[in-house]
Amino acid sequence: MTSAYLIASDLPVAWRKSTDSNPNDDCVECGALADGVIVTRDSKDPHGPALVFAGPKFSAFTTAVGSDTLVPVVG
């Protein structure tokens, strides 16, 4: 299940950003909650919403991004 209803800055997470990032880019930060739950947030909006993934779903998402197999959604 994926949800965007949590406020990212309220979560007890040590946020991490890629070392390939720089201050002027749009970046996503990730962190881990209990039981392998992964949360992400927009680094430019740390008090905005968090997107929550079960560990296997996040792994599948990052694999798809890395292999360029995502397709655009139109609508």
Image (tube, rainbow, N blue to C red):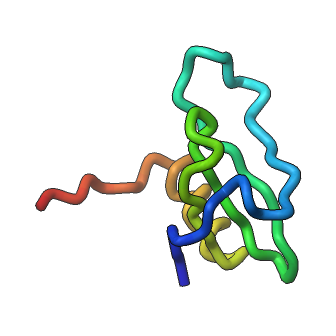
32 displayed left or right of 60: right
Residue at the limit of the structure toward the left, as seen here = 75
| Front residue of this view, candidates 64 and 49 | 49
Q: Position of residue 58 (x, y in %)?
A: 64, 67
Q: Position of residue 30 (x, y in %)?
A: 72, 51
Residue shown at the point (51%, 68%) measured from the top left: 4
Q: In the picture shown, does residue 41 fall above or below 61? A: above
Q: Quadrant of the N terminus?
A: bottom right
Q: Quadrant of the C terminus?
A: bottom left
| Front residue of this view, candidates 34 and 8 | 8
38 displayed left or right of 5: right
Q: In the picture shown, does residue 22 fall above or below 71? A: above
Quadrant in the rendering for residue 20: top right
Q: In the picture shown, does residue 5 fall above or below 64? A: below
Tally of numbered tags: 0
Q: Position of residue 23 (x, y in %)?
A: 65, 17
| Front residue of this view, candidates 60 and 22 | 22
22 displayed left or right of 48: right
Residue shown at the point (79%, 56%) measured from the top left: 31
Residue shown at the point (80%, 43%) measured from the top left: 16
Residue shown at the point (57%, 64%) measured from the top left: 51
